Amino acid sequence: MRVLFCSRRFFPAISGMSVYALNLLGELVAAGHDVTMVSQYRGDAAGTGIYGGGPPPAVPGVRVIGLRSHGEEMPGGADFALDVAAMRDAILAEHARAPFDVLHAQYGYPNGWAALLAAREIGVPVVVSIQGGDGHWVGSCCATHRVAMERVLHGADEVLIGCESFAAEVVERLGVPRGLFTIVPGAVDVARFTPRQPPGAAAEPVRLLYHGRVDRRKGALDLLHALAILRAQGVPFAATYSGIGPDLAASQALAGELGLDVRFSGYASYDDAPAVYAMGDVFVSPTHAEGFSNTILEAMASGLPCVSCRAVGVMDCLRDGENGLLVEPGDVPALAAALRRIIEDGALRTRLAEAALAECRATYSWSAVGRQIMDSYARVVAAPRRAPVDPALPHDPSCRFIAAPHLL
């Protein structure tokens, strides 16, 4: 099968989307599919400073086409329609060179919208993977993106989403039927991410690790306030923040204001990620919402006990007291209490880490998830095509992403 994969972000930008795309592409190539990837990338200082960026690297067995997101980089405010048109045109040009059997867009908007506009002209089925940003932000931001998301969800031949809690949130926000979604969970490379010490083992003091996008929506600032409570209580710990993001500078400033000795280790490539997890004994992800957390899966596979939140995209893979500790998003005192508990109770760390590791290996391997996605391709290719989407969208200049496109 000839597959077009349209990615919102790819390496060298570090994100869950990049990791997801790389692993899926590997599964598709290994299964014998002919794969082309079209990916947007930021090339400006502002964009690369927040996420990392630049043209996507080569991927073995995949034709890779990088498209600089000139519309998103507009100094006067983002023009997402410009980037949508560039993605659509790249898909059409590649289809003219060698026809595709299926288009798979990673992200409902702008990528899913671009794929549907291309499919309108070439009649190829479209699979769309809804990512965290879609459900939590796009659609509630403005009329333009709400209409676009509704058309993507109704117009795609199949819509994949990571978990039931995320599907429920999108249904509530956009008022669409639950039956539009096929659940395909996140996945982790369990050969790459493995324990480097017995699950639950810890140094003295216990090393707390935050790894991923440094973003207040991921709880980066909440964790610092919780660490200040631990210090006031006399609880010993070491803490590392790994990654970059929109709130890196704010986190560094807050750590300084609170007088916390926190190590900010900066950008970490995917190749370096296993070594990053080895720097921690407990993984802390006080996120407010996810599509499905790749970093939590990687930590589970690495044998680390996890402290996180009862948040969309987290509660589907972590259960409080069973394979992790969960608190309410934004509840800093509860987060501090959970951290103190896991720091002081070695038997608890071991029990949680061992349960998480076993579940991760059994449920979230890429071989199983890749098969589910390829089954989706087979279904849509065999089914009748959906009606073409209406390409006209309302213009709503009030969208907050116009001024802050890096948050999309």
Image (cartoon, rainbow, N blue to C red):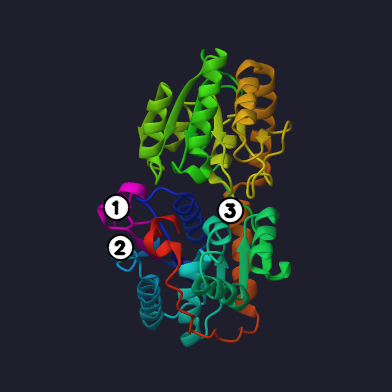
Whether residue 214 appears in magenta in the rendering, the answer is no
- As measured in the structure, the alpha-carbon distance from the residue carrying label 1 to the one carrying label 2 is 9 Å
SS class, disc 1: helix
Disc nearer the start of the sequence (2/3)? 2
SS class, disc 3: loop
Query: What residue span does the magenta drawing correspond to?
Result: 38-60
Amino acid at circle 3: Gly
Which residue shows up at 57% across the image and 77% down it?
151
- As measured in the structure, the alpha-carbon distance from the residue carrying label 3 to the one carrying label 1 is 25 Å
Q: Name the residue under label 2.
A: 73
Q: How many numbered callouts?
A: 3
Q: Mark 1 points at which residue?
A: 46
Percent coordinates x, y for residue 19 in the rendering:
47, 50
Q: Do the residues labelled 1 and 2 touch (CB within 8 Å)?
A: yes
Amino acid at circle 1: Ala
Residue 291's tag is 3
From what the image shows, is residue 226 above or below residue 285?
A: above
Amino acid at circle 2: Glu
